[in-house]
Amino acid sequence: MTFSPEDKAARALLGITPSGIRKYFDLLSEMEDVITLGVGEPDFPVPWHITETAIYSLSKGYTSYTSNSGLLELRQVISEWLEGLYGLHYEAEDEILITVGVSEGLDLSLRALVNPGDEVIMADPCYVSYMPCTILAGGIPVMVPTRREEGFKLNPLALEKAITPRSKILLLNYPSNPTGATMSRAELIPIAQIVEAHDLVVVSDEIYERLTYGETHCPFASLPGMKERTILLNGFSKAYAMTGMRVGYAASNKTFIGLMTKIHQYTALCAPTTSQMGAIEGLRNGSASVTRMVKEYDQRRRFFVDGLNKIGLECSLPEGAFYAFPSIRVTGLTSEEFCDRLLAEKKVAAVPGSAFGESGEGHIRCAYANAMPNLKKALDRMGEFVKGLGVCR
Amino acid sequence: MLSDRELAILGILEEDAKVAPAEIAVRLGIEEEEVRRIIERLEQGKVIVKYKAKVNWDKADDQRLFAFIDVRVTPERNRGFDTVANKLYRFPEVHSLYLMSGDHDLTVVIQGRSLKEVATFVAEKLAPMEGVVGTATHFVLKSYKHDGDVLVEEKEEDRRLKITP
């Protein structure tokens, strides 16, 4: 009997397709002179004081496991941080868990709470892992379309419509990847009322918390009555440019954190010790570095979005993260066709909006976490491309 | 006190003096006319002193030599160190001049073309100057970083994957 690896695959994986960006990854690895707007991470290196602290901890031999929950010192710093900035009180001992980035925090949240058939509601478009992680946890993803005309914010009426007796979790991500949308306190309050009325749990991925350009960030847990029913997910990848160091955290009630820790201790054991050391330094002394990076992103954001509008790709000014999400409808191409041809003809990489959900169609995601000269070149090439299509100004 | 806008414009120009007012306006979300007005005001007030290229002379064939000279000075009644400083900064060889705390009074940075040129300046101009009581000359052997810019490395390459979620 011949051995067939395919037949051995877990059935749960059959419903999961590879991410829509995968094919570009393969294409790009063979191309040179590409300007990429496809990178969802900061272009700055980790601030040197953080790197130096991490190296020092290595040289001092801090290389063993930490507690499953993570270094108590890091949890204490996070607790003080949330208290000081937002008045949110979480006990460092049992209401905060250090995770291997928000990616793990998301997976833990879903696996800790989802029973087979439970519905997990999320905005469409959304980050690529929300739907697959929901399916892997045995849940059913329910997409709530968001629209460019409404700044890709979650519309309370649309949310209400998506709710069924099986709804259990609302997954939020503001500021948003891929749209750069934010939601203010006033905009979140009607959402909180619906959450309360239908007894939902909120998993709020706030990884872009520090990257806002207008109003300061409002954590969902800070809304009246929401702290108990919210799992706050955050990390150090975006604000401190520590993507490869893989460290994040979850904060919630004791019960939820306990359930998540149960999975975490058997699957990840603990987040990398070196990264946790760096994270402590980041939270303690990193404000100046973060402010400097945010200022820079802010300027690039205005410059890049202005450029997109000038070449005829309509785009409103995103209030958070480092993504512009322009409409490409005017070209008559699908978002995938647009990105394929832009890459082949002009060597500029962007991600089709459709990779983030059906409502992302007609848009492309452009990360402006890139040096100014590259953004200029990218805009020039995109301008030539759009002009060549003969459909816009 | 400068306004946030003025500080933001200075920040951009300090990084790259060639950025045009139109681009600054877009980056800061204000009118080009206002950017021009602010820059003109900063220039007139000598907040912006001048615009010039930063040259890495180690890379140019035209070798330059830098020396840091610690100078001890007898201060003058009512004028302190200003008289000596005033005489010193008029020399074109003096690249920078600072009044210091610590065990000496002035630090003079000299830019010369040769060891001999610097030595002559110290021996004939600086050391004999009235009020100067002692000097210690230190030559720069290699410049690693100058005025905020690292000179020894090529630009750091972008090590990120070309596309990530």
Image: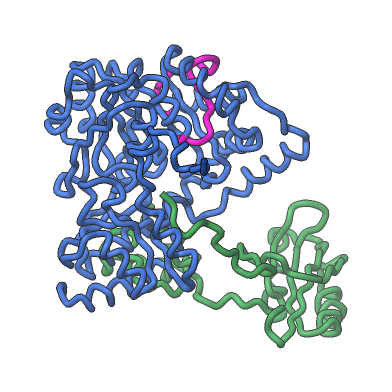
Chain colours: A blue, B green
Q: Is residue A371 above or below residue A213?
A: below
Image coordinates for residue A133, horizontal then vertical, percent = 38, 34
Residue at coordinates 12% horizontally, 31% vertically from top-left?
Answer: A157
Does residue B6 appear in this view?
no
User: Where does residue A84 sit, x and y in percent of width and height?
Assistant: 45, 26
Residue B126 is covered by the magenta coloring: no
Report if residue A90 lies within the magenta region.
yes
- For the point 87% across and 66% down, the residue is B136
Q: Is residue A49 left or right of residue B130?
A: left
Residue at x 71%, y 43% (from the top left corner): A55
Rendering quarter of residue A115: top left
Front-most of A390 and A8? A8
> In the image, is A321 to the left or to the right of A97?
left
Residue that extends furthest to the front in the rendered view of this protein: A1
Q: Which residues are magenta?
A: A85-103
Q: Nearer the viewer, residue B86 or A69?
A: A69
Percent from the top left, x then y, of residue A311? 23, 70
Does residue B106 appear in this view? yes
